[in-house]
Amino acid sequence: MKLLVEELREKRTLGDAGLMELLTSDDPSADACLFAAARETAEAHFGRQVFLRALIEWSNICRNDCLYCGIRRSNPDVRRYSLSRESILRCCENAWRLGLRTFVLQGGENPPAAEKLAGLVAEIRASWPQAAITLSLGELPADTYARLRQAGADRYLLRHESADPAHYARLHPAGMRLENRLACLRTLRELGYQTGMGMMVGSPFQTTGNLLADIRLLERFRPEMIGIGPFIPHPATPLGAYPAGSSERTLRLYAILRLMHPDALIPATTALSTLRPDGRTAGILAGANVIMPNFTPAVERAEYTLYEGKASLAVETAENIRKIHEELAAIGRTVSPSRGDYQENLSKDTDNHV
Ligand code: 5AD
């Protein structure tokens, strides 16, 4: 196992059999070795700094009906909301004051509303010229992506969810296609967005072979950001009775992907923290280097339930940031004061990471 980790570290890739072995191992000492290599690689590229992103869940109105997602269109139990302009600007202000330099506007898929967001993106861009703006609004027409980019958005998160078309089809309603999603990702990249992809670990029907296909897709596309979290069932969805994904396997994927993509921005996701209280630090210690604290106002936050028991539902924003600083200090990490843009071949001795 140690040899496989060394090969992965050096070559930044590995054959299928080797990757399968790393993914399926249940030997804790193999994990320890894998995580240590990933940690060292993250440290060599980013130092001991972690980037924070302010997550603002601006609307849970969604035209889509993904079979796993709690805010799917056909869940009638959700009270739908969209944050007002004032409320979103207050979230940004709050995040900026607490030292965050990236605002992530995430919401359900709603093309007309997304179109209207362009004005707000321009306003955020003008008010905080030094902040990065990340969007996560699903599949939109190319001209909407273009308009949002022009308004000042820098990055876009759009998980591919599964690289296997047959598996993808079992997680999504008829009409949604992996091909469309990949076309969106290519458009985003062409428009100059730093682009994030990713998938859930342990989503229903997922095989280890599916995860291998995800790894290979990421390897081909080389997104700047890679977002991965365990599947967590939401009882009001068609897939609500399937078991949650494994947090160990999620951590293993962080480590494998860190070794394959030394410069990528990889968050320790909220879904992981939902499964285990030490999810953030465990993620960082397995090679992740981003944390995305939630800045959605408490009332609306309760309605943005993609899955059950979502972590940090009740935690006050400032208190949460203080806690993150503390947790990171305890593992010898600090919060980066920078925007944390993707930089290729970043290495700590070139000292250009701040
Ligand atoms: N469990 C875990 N992650 C989920 N997402 C949606 N529903 C769930 C769930 N039940 C993830 C999807 C989506 C992201 C915003 O949240 O991967 O892309």
Image: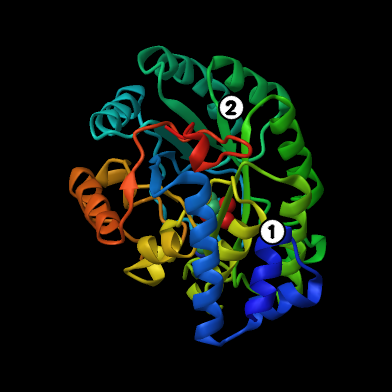
Q: Say which label, 1 or 2, has the lower sequence index.
A: 2
- Quadrant including the N terminus: bottom right
x, y percent for residue 226: 59, 50
According to the image, what is the colour scheme of the structure? rainbow
Question: In this rendering, is residue 204 above or below 280?
Answer: below
Which residue occupies 44% across, 17% down? 125
Residue 274 visible here: yes
CB under 8 Å between callouts 1 and 2?
no
Q: Residues within 10 Å of mark 2 (few under 14, many from 20)?
A: few
Is 9 left or right of 272, judged from the image as shown?
right
Q: Is residue 126 left or right of residue 9?
A: left
Report which residue position mark 2 lands on.
112
Q: Can you say whether 118 is above or below 140 in the image?
A: above
Q: Residue shown at 75%/31% (left/top)?
A: 187
**Tag 2: amino acid:** Pro
Circle 1 Cα neighbour tier, 10 Å, few/some/many (<14 / 14–19 / ≥20): some
**202 above or below 343?**
below
Q: Quadrant of residue 237?
A: bottom right
Q: Nearer the viewer, residue 177 or 29?
A: 29
The residue tagged 1 is 172
What amino acid type is highlighted by mark number 1?
Answer: His
Is residue 205 something that shows in the picture?
no
Q: Say which residue appears at 40% left-offset and 50% top-offset.
A: 304
**Residue nearest the observer in this picture, 343 or 297:** 343
Q: Secondary structure at mark 2?
A: helix
